[in-house]
Image: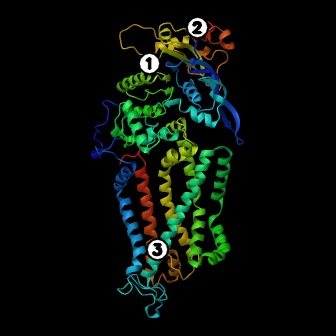
Amino acid sequence: MAGSTRASPIVEPATGVPIAVAAPRRHVTPGREAWRRFRRHRLAVLSAGILMTMIVAVVFGPLIWRVPINEIDFAAMLESPSWAHPLGTDDLGQDLLARMMYGGRISLAVGLAAMTMAVVVGTLVGAVAGVSRGRVDAGLMWLTDLFLSLPQLPLLLLIIYLFRDSLKEVAGPEMGTFVLIVVVIGGFRWMPVARLVRAQFFSLRERDFVEAARALGASTLRQVVRHILPNALGPVIVAGTIDVAAAIIAESTLSFLGLGFPPDIPTWGRILYDAKDYLDVAPHWALFAGGAIFLAVLSINYIGDGLRDALDPRRVM
Amino acid sequence: MTQPLLRVNDLVKNFALKGGILGRIVDEVHAVDQVSFDLSAGETLGLVGESGSGKSTTGRCILRLIEPTAGEIWFEGRDIVKLDAKELGALRRDMQIIFQDPYASLNPRMTVGAIVGEALIIHGLAKSRRAIEERVVELLETVGLGADHMRRYPHEFSGGQRQRIGIARALAVSPKLIVCDEPVSALDVSIQAQVINLLEDLQKEFGLTYLFIAHDLSVVEHICTRVAVMYLGRLVEIASSRDLYTRPLHPYTEALLSAVPVPAPRAKRQRIRLEGEVPNPINPPTGCHFHARCPIRQLPLCSTEKPQLKRAADGHWVACHLRG
């Protein structure tokens, strides 16, 4: 850490208090400082690279690899990877690379959308509870505990059974299922975020700078938006990355149980589900789908680790 | 005699301690117990006492950052305890606070310009972005910082500079009264002097009135015109700075003064050591709060009767049965 221990020219002599004044750069925004610290976390940077590659591949891949996802070719059933089919084929001779790329779009989109929903709902509930205290807080925390204590998988299955068909009619089979799955997964993952945000609010609202804002006459809304929330979001972002991973796994679980998207729409979880009967004949089929989920979840978790370290100013990087 | 800028009358603050599954109030911390004092415009009143004596709570009650349990706080002829939210908003322009910890008192995610300029936006004191910026630069220059500091973030500054930013923020609304809550306690000695000189210069320039909360008596002696001593939520002595330091009446004040270090290591001095600890404010002693540790107590009088603040000399008040 030799580079960051230089004294800054603006330090008053003999301050005596150790201060985190960084290099002699003009001014360091918190964002830039966080980025500098994130870059020192090698595993996180590598993971970010892998995730970016995956996202680029699933978004732009189908534009280059123009094999349809549902072209059935019984002559090429359960083939191992080859030049014609780089990831091999499934039991109907469909090209796995095309299906993986298409499925990746859905899996990653579900992950990100469900995370967004969990973070937004959790932040909202936690912020309202943290600001209001008293009865509202007690009520909201009771609700949070209720959600935490619900048996999630059976309930998930029940909700999907009940609402899948009506939503499909409104929004089409693919979009309907997407919305349903995002809502269901997001709706069951906001509680940790809400507790986190509430705890952050409780500690931040007593801090001097929030009291200073109150003394200046700042409204409650202003105190929350300008002072409390920006300082509470670091841990939330980290919790959010973990939620992405959890949502991808949850979608895979649902698809694996046959309850996610319709069978003809490939997602990583669905591909894995279809592959399970052919593990001995065509292991590549399950391996690629499982590997993609594994890699995505692992890299997102490492990114979360890196973000946590980068956003925690107490940690010396 | 003219009306004082601030008159505190029998201020009481109890913090409820909740317990049990029903969250009932099981006990109360008596943080401030019937504190009364006056503060004239342009004056600096020191509020001293050890930690837990209720001095910060008193300061925060005056600003209504904490709601007082009982009592009156008259500011410019109005009892501010009774103000509604809108009137309170207007009051925020007249009273400000400077905090002890310069590291905790500035929002780490706002630029210095945004921190100092926030009050201008809240109270609509500057019309345009340009006007805000000009005023912020003016304020920063007033406290000895420069315009180029505006776009930086608090973590780029030292403790003393941060405290200057905090002062600039308080000055933004052109307040009449500033509660200084131990503004130099967290600073290095050499920086303490700079900040205190700055506070004195600002007082002269803007005619400010300070309520100066501190536990360091040598700092208080330097800056304050009058000093009030608190012990366990009660005011035990209030006098002009000179009177208090030369002729302390209350035994607690005597003990406090004898603990002030003097820059003459060989000087002979009598050190009054107090026995025991500060009693628990949940269950304060009966009678005089100080009687359990008092070297001159007379039982049973001191343990049964609560001493009232009485006039001992011109402007010198003391709450002791045996002195004054």
Q: Can residue A248 be seen in this view?
A: no
The subunit letter for the residue under badge 3 reads A
The three-letter amino acid code for the residue at tag 1 is Ile
Q: What element carries label 1?
A: helix
Camera sees residue A150: yes
SS under mark 2: loop
**CB atoms of marks 1 and 3 within 8 Å:** no
Question: In this orientation, which residue lies closer to the viewer: B180 or A291?
Answer: B180
The circle on residue A274 is: none
Q: Disc 1 to disc 3, how far (Cα)?
A: 69 Å
Q: Is residue A4 left or right of residue B199?
A: left
Q: Which mark is residue A104?
A: 3
Query: Share a chain, discs 2 and 3?
Result: no
Q: Are marks 1 and 3 on the same chain?
A: no
Residue A137 x/y as whole percent: 65, 47
Instruction: Look at label 2 and name its amino acid.
Output: Ile
Which residue in the protein does label 1 denote? B223
Taking A54 as reference, is B156 above or below it?
Answer: above
What's the residue at 34%, 31% (across, down)? Answer: A15
Residue in view at x 54 percent, y 35 percent: A215
Residue B150 is situated, as x and y percent measured from the top left of the image, at 37, 40
| Mark pair 1, 2: CA separation | 31 Å
C-alpha separation, residue under disc 2 versus residue under disc 3 = 83 Å
**Which label belongs to residue B296?**
2
Q: Which of B167 and B14 is in front in this view?
A: B167
Question: Which quarter of the figure has residue B187?
Answer: top left
